[in-house]
Image (cartoon, helix red, strand yellow):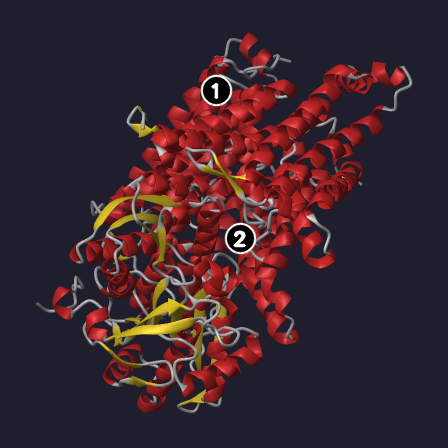
Amino acid sequence: MTDFFGVPLPALLGQLLLGLVNGSFYAMLSLGLAVIFGMLNIINFAHGALYMMGAFLAWMGLEYFGINYWAMLLIAPLIVGVFGLVIERLLLQWLYKLDHLYGLLLTFGLTLVIEGVFRSFFGVGGQPYAAPEALSGATNLGFMILPNYRAWVVVASLVVCLGVWVLIEKTSLGATLRAGTENPKLVQAFGVNVPRLVTLTYAGGVALAGFAGVLAAPILQVNALMGSNLIIVVFAVVVIGGMGSILGSILTGLGLGVVEGLTKVFYPEASNTVVFVVMALVLLVRPAGLFGKEK
Amino acid sequence: MKTTLKSIALASVLACGAIGAQAQISGDTIKIGIITDMSSVYADIDGAGGVEAIRMAIADAKGMAAGKKIELVFADHQNKADVAASKAREWFDTQGLDLLIGGTNSGTSLAMAKVAAEKKKPFISIGAGTSRLTNEECTPYTIHYAYDTVALANGTGAAVTKSGGKTWYFLTADYAFGTSLQADTSAVVAKSGGQVLGAVKHPLNASDFSSFLLQAQSSKAQILGLANAGGDTINAVKAANEFGITKTMKLAGLLMFINDVHSLGLKTTEGMYLTDSWYWNQSPEARAWSRRFFEKMKRMPSSLQAADYSAVSHYLKAVEATKSDDGDKLMAQMKATPVNDFYTKATIRKEDGRAVHDMFLLQVKTPKESAEPWDYFKVVTRISGDDAFTKLADSKCPLVKK
Amino acid sequence: MNKKPLGYGALFIAIALLPFLGVYPIFAMKVMCYALFACAFNLLIGFTGLLSFGHAAFLGAAAYAAGHAMKVWGFPPLVGIAFGTLMAAVAGLVFGLLAIRRSGIYFSMITLALAQMLFFYFLQAPFTGGEDGLQSVPRGSLLGINLESDSALYYLVLAIFIFGFWLIYRTVHSPFGQVLTSIRENEARATSLGYDAARFKLMAFVLSAALAGLAGATKTLVLGFATLTDAIWTTSGLVILMTLVGGMGTMVGPIVGALVIIALENKIGDLGQWLASLTGIQWFGGLGESVSLVTGLIFIVCVLAFRRGLVGEAGALWERVRKT
């Protein structure tokens, strides 16, 4: 077997592939965050908690109602999206004129509330959730055995991310969205209902998080804290990619997943922190992020 | 204006201070406190079931000892040593705690042992595994009751190595327990003619073991030693099956309980060895007590929950005998009296607080061999207490005179 | 006019009397440490306008440094605390030099990133004990008085707290403090007046970090241990909450905020258990978990309605009442 810097090739490829799976989650979550920040100027700390909510909804759907995975892939994001709609109308809309800080603090408070509710009902121990029949089992890739479900995660994430990117960059709805970000008053003067657009954007962004949650449920243990472990990494991804840049988030998310995987091979203990090292470096050299534009 | 603000602050400080005031010392009750993991990775093997077991012990003592009423308090340490230590200190200082029971998690037990020693009150560690409690960190007030990592190593470690598992790789929980278990098992593996090829540490309550397992697989060791417990073991075993690790490596669950086997199912765990201090089906007395427990909790007790009952009963008997709640007297009495109940026959060593009793090397039955629900284990051998635990001569406890 | 020092004096005397009123000294000392932490944080956000997301790094750095110094090197308590504070100041200098170059949300994110990196170091470094924490830090003695006694330690902690608070007070009410306020209000204008904004911000940052460190080192002395909880990012969030609830930009606000939050943390668990034993409904026992729930609700309410915090709102109310 060929060795790569002293590490056997199969081990390296295996970790890179796992890193790609993680990267898909980073990409989807940072995508939602970037969209929300671009449109609402709100740094949505609650993104992690809503991702967790998506996972829990999938679990509850199966456990209490017998609804299978495929249906929950559609239902859970919908429920999370509606929840997001309610949050935006009830709480967030009062903060648009204020400093970024307050949106962040409010959504941080929201995170604590959502996590607290789930924690008090389900504790912190994880609930197991089985992958659907069609995706269970594994494929022997030679250098490792990859559970089919993980391959599906990568494919599904890429499709959804690409879809969102196309929607925002290439369709007229997306164009209106982008215009609304640049100059809401002017767009409103054109007869577009900007507040409704804003609400729908938030709902859509968190629905993406909910979708990611459903995807994550069979891989991780569904537990109340799964979002908070992830959210600061996702923040870092968005900052590195450039806050507000859609493409930046997707590419950075995937890239950082792979970088994390690489770190796991050579210096496993540092894998949690490598994202932050990269973020600090990027912020010092290119403050607007790799793909961002300085506002 | 500012003065008024000060007054407001003053008033709130005083008010909150009054609410925070908790300085009643209860001299006329026997207060027992258990701090354990109630909601996280170790919640099933002890947790609320452990609290219930202690309630049973108190009820069986008719709620009174030496003429005083027995009270029970419990808290969730969330696997954080600072939460456990702070809670224990608060109970000792403000609630007149007489006995502290340490549930799962070795890091918290180490912290609680120190607080109890400072307050000169008995501390019985039941759920924690680290052998440090009776070695480097021993105190005159610590009793390590149920099991420890040395016993696990001498049991499972020796058995697996002798039955052909010569090369080992460890997946270790990154805190006191995992480190102890890995160290003690490595020593036994080496003594039994085996070799340790490497180890990888994972954070406590990790959710995704895939990358750690890949590393383990690339070591090409025969045995994957799981130096973790509870939810971590369950997830690691599941992931190992998912990624086909079990095709090339055999899993050795160095600390497993009946709850873990119940979660994973017999098909996944059949043939695995485990070392434990007690099994619900091991004797008529054990069965009788377990049925009582099952009625309340709807699941069979783990050895830790049985140990909770046994330890508290032992303590209450000591209180009856000495008619005192003085820490020193009770420690002397508990160490002088042997334990003899449905859980075990044990003597608590005077010098280091180690409860020495027989351990069992168990093996998980195949689905065919299992006759009734929860009938999971068969006894392979009985390991005598002297063989299982650290001998006094080898002890690293500073209180042991050499 | 000079009623202020009288007001503060009365406050400190009240705190000094608390042990005699039956308050659990460890609880009160813990509140004082976190209050100092929040006051230090407030110096940065309330008076200089810089939001640091990684302030727990300084609390933790000093906690571990002081703990190690007192336990392993046998430093006496005051020297240990001073050492811890120094380490936090050094960390503050390094963080500050890197973070000051950017502003706004990017400043905050850099502080978060650096704090995470320091947290990772604490997780791995053997001397911290990782998940198990640094335990058994001895209390030692001061001027011949054994600090093992909670009441003796109480007055030392109170003295440290008063010292820290006095330092912040003097800083805020000095020309230096006024420059900081001007930078918060309008940095461009301050620069145009000839002030090197970056230097002032850095000095404020280091001072804030050092005082946060003082709080952390003292906390280690009180509790006898230092754990990862001191350096984790949720503690950074906690201090933001304390300052927000109490009142950013006020002197006493953070103290009130710290008191409210810590009292909440402590008592919710007990309240839940009492309800559980009373009603027999197990779910109430889990109310201890809902500390985060209640904390979150407070956060939301404060951001929406009480942006000036308890003290700020009370002050504004008083002003209105006075005018009518």
Identify the element where label 2 is drawn.
helix
Amino acid type, residue under disc 1 in the picture: Ile
Badge 1 is on which residue? C100
> What quarter of the picture does the C terminus of chain A occupy?
top right
Q: Residue at x 16, y 69 (%)?
A: B391
Q: Residue A130 location, x and y as percent?
A: 59, 50
Q: Is residue A173 left or right of residue B59?
A: right
Q: Residue C70 location, x and y as percent?
A: 25, 47
- Answer above or below: position of B293 versus C37: below
Label 1 CA crowd tier, 10 Å (few <14, some 14–19, many 20+): many
Instruction: Please give the chain letter of the residue carrying mark 2.
Output: C
> What quarter of the picture does the N terminus of chain A occupy?
top left
The answer to whether one can see residue A13 in this image is yes
Name the residue furthest right. A191
Q: Residue at x 54, y 30 (%)?
A: A23
Q: Residue A85 location, x and y as percent?
A: 78, 38
Alpha-carbon span between mark 1 and mark 2: 31 Å
Q: Residue at x 75, y 19 (%)?
A: A181
Q: Residue C188 location, x and y as percent?
A: 59, 12
Badge 2 is on which residue? C262
- Answer above or below: position of A258 versus B390: above
- Answer above or below: position of B118 versus A54: below
Q: Is residue B329 left or right of residue C165?
A: left
Instruction: Please give the chain letter of the residue carrying mark 1.
Output: C
- Answer above or below: position of A155 versus A78: above
**First-in-chain label (1 vs 2):** 1
Number of numbered discs present? 2
Amino acid type, residue under disc 2 in the picture: Ile
